Amino acid sequence: MSAIATETTKAAESTRTVHFRIKRCDGPGKPSRWEVFDVPVPAHANVISCLQWIAANPTTADGKATTPVVWESSCLEEVCGACTMVINGKVRQSCSCLMDEYAPNDGDTITLEPMSKFPVIRDLWVDRSRMFDALKRVRAWVPIDGTYSLGPGPMEGPKESETRYKLSECMTCGCCLEACPQYHLETDEAAWATSFIGAAPISQARLFNEHETGAVLKADRLEALMGPGGINDCGNAQNCVQVCPKEIPLTESIATIGRAATFEAFRRFFQSR
Amino acid sequence: MAEQQGFMERHHFLLRRLHSLSGIVPIGVFLIVHLTTNASVIWGAANGRAAPYAADAAGRGVATFQHEVNFINNLPLLLLIEIFGLWLPIAFHVILGIVYAMTGSKNTQTYAYTGNKRYLLQRLSGYVGVLFIFYHVASLRWGWTFLVPNGTEWSHYFAASTLAAALKGEAGMWTTPGVIVAIFYFIGVSLLVYHFANGLWTAAITWGITVSEAAQKRWGYVCTAVGVVLMGTAWTALGGFLFAVDYDQARAVEEQIFIEHHGEEGLQKFMDNPVDEQAAATIHEAEPGDG
Ligand code: SF4
Ligand code: SF4
Ligand code: FES
């Protein structure tokens, strides 16, 4: 008991003030503005815990009462991707963003912005529907629905399963799209089908192409990725692989789909009716 | 416009891949041949067959380069080769390249990764490269001499001397506009070599030839080596024309070669009326035993 008390006192002692510069927006289509909050930050805090403090104390640094800052988060352990935002100019998850690393000293400033490639719903909360739409576009699933039992699934070697396990870690967070110079904000849903799809769905297409049962949809996936907005719109800047928090080998996936597309094009030219 | 977009979208895959391919064949291959030919003004010094034309290294270089240029100019169907092997592919690559480059954006301040800088430089080098190629071709091939500092008209009969004069801005001497032209050549040609080497690297990803990160890295070393060698060749060529060629000596060597092909009369006739290139050729045909 006393040990915990000492810990708490220590944390309280080491509390420092950090200026949070936050880009705010009241709703879709509304103008955005900057607000600064002075947050007492204890040791071991992360950005989310500070946002929770701001939600409870919605007063700006110059003493004006304001609305609580809105953000999205769920797992708090970097596996759901919901809390992705732009911190000090770079995209990352805010739940795993440690204050001791980003603002170690009293008086430090940290800047939070919503991702720029997705429409803002409010403040730091963005609408990532387009990513989920993209997963549908590339049929990122194993088709097993039917009226009768398909029997046991195929056997898989440890090597394949290792490769695919890595790919399956994608949490649709959007970091790879935010950092991609070929991926742009598209508010018009009708344009999604022909705007560059980005690295994550390409990598997911590979994941399911390499699944023995999932492979039956391979031609459909390639069809979607060989058209406008598909694989060829990638400019090989390779930012995606640099920023992916799951360290998914995205450029390898892009090249794998590129190769499959090459073969598919030859197959269509020489073989298909 | 809507129809044009429809075309681009319908043939999206084919156009993209042809754009990638055209950068290597024929354009990249031409770049290698062109730079190697031009560098002959230096490596020609080691060419034994050029020895009769000049005692010194510079003269042998000039003679070798002249022979290379003559060889190219004597290729059958040269104009057709130029149109279908060069102009159309370059126009295709440039136009689509600009369309594609406009779909990109620049975020190197935030994401200052090497790959991102390479991506940006690929697009910048494309834009500057187009301007350079336009100037290069217009001033030397199409004879837009108002673009050349002292109005030198490049002649394939006097290849090295007129080229050196067009670059430096004056026969044998440096002028301020000449320095600017020379620097523009240096920048232009360097960026184009980069564009080719980096394009070679990305094309391997686009086509799915290099898949793993390790393979991309290995191929990266190969492309770097290709780029370095080609850059050396380009700088050798440019340096050769700027610093090694002596105008008067080069002219003398070239006249010697001209006489060998077209006779004294041919040279005289050509000097009187340099525009009429046919004249010299006609004389040559009339006296086949000559030279
Ligand atoms: S490699 Fe392609 S998908 Fe990845 S950041 Fe670059 S352009 Fe975007
Ligand atoms: S590939 Fe990586 S960066 Fe992209 S959405 Fe998935 S987890 Fe996020
Ligand atoms: S809350 Fe799930 S990744 Fe941050």
Image (cartoon, coloured by chain):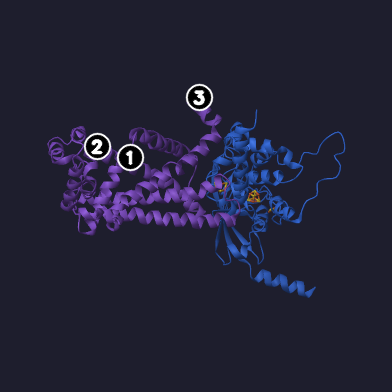
Chain colours: A blue, B purple
Disc ID at residue B3: 3
Q: Residue at x 72, y 38 (%)?
A: A217
Label for residue B134?
Answer: 1
Query: In terms of secondary structure, where does tag 2 sit?
Result: loop
Where residue B153 appears, as percent x and y from the top left, is 21, 41
Question: Label 1 to label 2, Cα distance in Å?
Answer: 11 Å
- Secondary structure of the residue carrying tag 3 is helix
Q: CA distance from mark 1 to mark 3?
A: 29 Å
Residue at x-position 81% and y-position 37%: A145
Q: Position of residue B5 (x, y in %)?
A: 51, 29
Q: Position of residue A26 (x, y in %)?
A: 60, 42
| Left or right for B23, reference A97 | left
Q: Which residue is mark 2?
A: B144
Quadrant where the C terminus of chain A is found in the figure: top right
* Mark 2 C-beta closer than 8 Å to ligand 1: no
State yes or no: Cβ of the residue under disc 3 lies below 8 Å from any atom of ligand 1.
no
Q: Which residue is at the far front?
A: B289
Front-most of residues A199 and A191:
A199
Q: Separation of disc 2 and disc 3 at Cα?
A: 36 Å
Q: Which mark is residue A127?
A: none
In the rendered structure, which disc, 2 or 3, sits on the residue that comes first in sequence?
3
